Amino acid sequence: MSTTAEIKIDGQTYEFPVITGTEGEKAIDISKLRDLTGHITLDFGYKNTGSTKSAITFLDGEQGILKYRGYPIEELAEKASFLEVAYLLIYGELPSAETLEKFQKDISMHTLIHEDMKKFFDGYPSKSHPMAQLSSLVCSLSTFYPESLEANQSDEEKDLTIIKMLAKMTTIVAFIYKKSLGHPLIYPKNKYDYITNYLWMTFGQRTEDFEPNPVVVSAMNKLLILHADHEQNCSTSTVRIVGSSDCNLYASISAGISALWGPLHGGANQAVIEMLEKIKADGGDTDKWIAKAKDKNDPFRMMGFGHRVYKNFDPRAKIIKKACDDILESLGINDPVLEIAKKLEQAALTDQYFIDRKLYPNVDFYSGIIYRALGFPSEMFTVLFALGRLPGWIAQWKEMRSNKEPIGRPRQIYVGDVDKHM
Ligand code: ACO
């Protein structure tokens, strides 16, 4: 098997090493390309560009495989808790029972946010988008914990920043929701586990104790695990590239949250429900909307369909689809929007346009329906995605720092005017 690749430019041949990953994927290492040839590569949207070597997540888009640290997503979603998966992603191994207990306890001890942060919530317009609030609030954590600004934190200090990030995220996310309703904030309780505590702060009442519905806890656990990491996507690459300037964890995660917000990325879960509602209000004619999605003169896209990497099926969508059916059944919800979703899915899966372009339902197609069944407004959906993705972002930021990766700085081909003068 070849371990080098040759590139011929102006009659001269240059050799570059071929790197093979542990799952067999191959890359041509062109880090010396410009030095040797004076050329760079051009790859809009980085469709063929590997930005790093990573030991966190493996995905094979052709086969529909997703693994965290070697464990298949199907097994983790079935058997693990979200915090176990978070620990696995961040520290590389599944925790022992004792380690998990300590991890959970350490997080519980840091769930409160500084009381002064509550003033920020009062300052936002009541209808402002939760993702804008989340990104700002997470960045603001660095103002309350200035020790995080130190680029060369010891491992212990870094771990504490990570614990604080994981802990305060649930409180911030829950407070954003409560504020959007104009309800009083509910403070965290240390006796609850990570997900129950989040549900308590979101759905609990101030004076009563809280009995979480096990179906809801299990659904949240699964959803957060399925979203926990997805290698070098738009938001994760953002976290890594921001962190590569030695920027602190909170600000790097805040940048990732902004990147996730867009409807072509994490914002798609909100866009899916809004699309389904629109189709319903329009009379529910799915054929009409499929035709619109196929029409190149129509800007409409079938939200929740297609993926940059998955070209066969999204393994997360398979699990979520089943979870979605289970939840709707056990909560006794009959959602007319789900019927439209099912019709759209069937029609698109058998339509030549979608088959030719390998467009399948992605994770966002079903997650919105579950969040809706759990009682969340659509504007919160991407925030919940961010809550799930947090351990992945942290793990990727930590890996990038440990590998001492250089500052991210792509090049360009200049195509503007030349030699102009005043
Ligand atoms: N509806 C209709 N046509 C589509 C869709 C769609 N959802 N997605 C892609 N296509 C078509 C494109 O028009 C293009 O057609 P062409 O070859 O005839 O020009 C072809 O399929 C390839 O599409 P690209 O945009 O080049 O694919 P890319 O990999 O760049 O984009 C993306 C992937 C952004 C996910 C795209 O499929 C999309 O916009 N989907 C809808 C938004 C969405 O669901 N995003 C969530 C992704 S999952 C996540 O981030 C968590």
Image: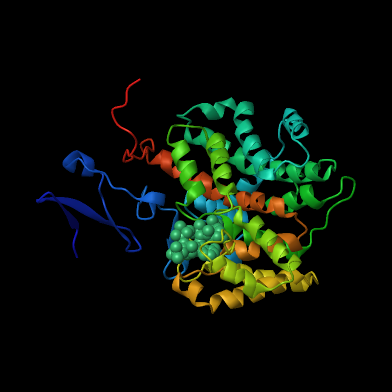
Front residue (pair 63, 97): 63
Q: How is the image coloured?
A: rainbow
Judge by depth and name the residue closer to the eye, 225 or 333. 333
> On the rendered structure, is 293 left or right of 407?
right
Q: Is residue 313 visible?
A: yes
Along the horizontal axis of the image, is 374 left or right of 95? right
Give the farthest residue toward the right: 207
How far from the left and from the top, in percent, is residue 415? Answer: 33, 39
* Residue under the image location 79 percent in, 69 percent down: 331
Query: Residue 370 placed where, x, y %?
Result: 70, 63
Query: Residue 38 falls in which quadrant of the image?
Result: top left
Quick one: which residue is furthest to the left in this view?
11
On-image quarter of the N terminus: bottom left
Determine which quarter of the picture holds residue 61: bottom left
Could you tell me residue 315's position as x and y percent?
Answer: 52, 68
Note whether 54 is above or below 184 in the view shown.
Answer: below
Which residue, as the protein is rendered here, is positioned at the far front? 422
> Picture coordinates of residue 329 (x, y %)?
76, 74
Q: Quadrant of the C terminus?
A: top left
Between 161 and 244, the one nearer to me in the picture: 244
Nearer the observer, 85 or 201: 201
Name of the residue lying farthest toward the top = 422
Residue at left 48%, top 43%? 238
Write down the quadrant of residue 4 in the picture: bottom left
Picture residue at 43% right of the left edge, 44% below the top: 399
Placement of 307 over or under 34, stated as above or below: below
Q: From where the camera sits, is residue 71 visible?
A: no
Answer left or right for 234 relative to 214: left
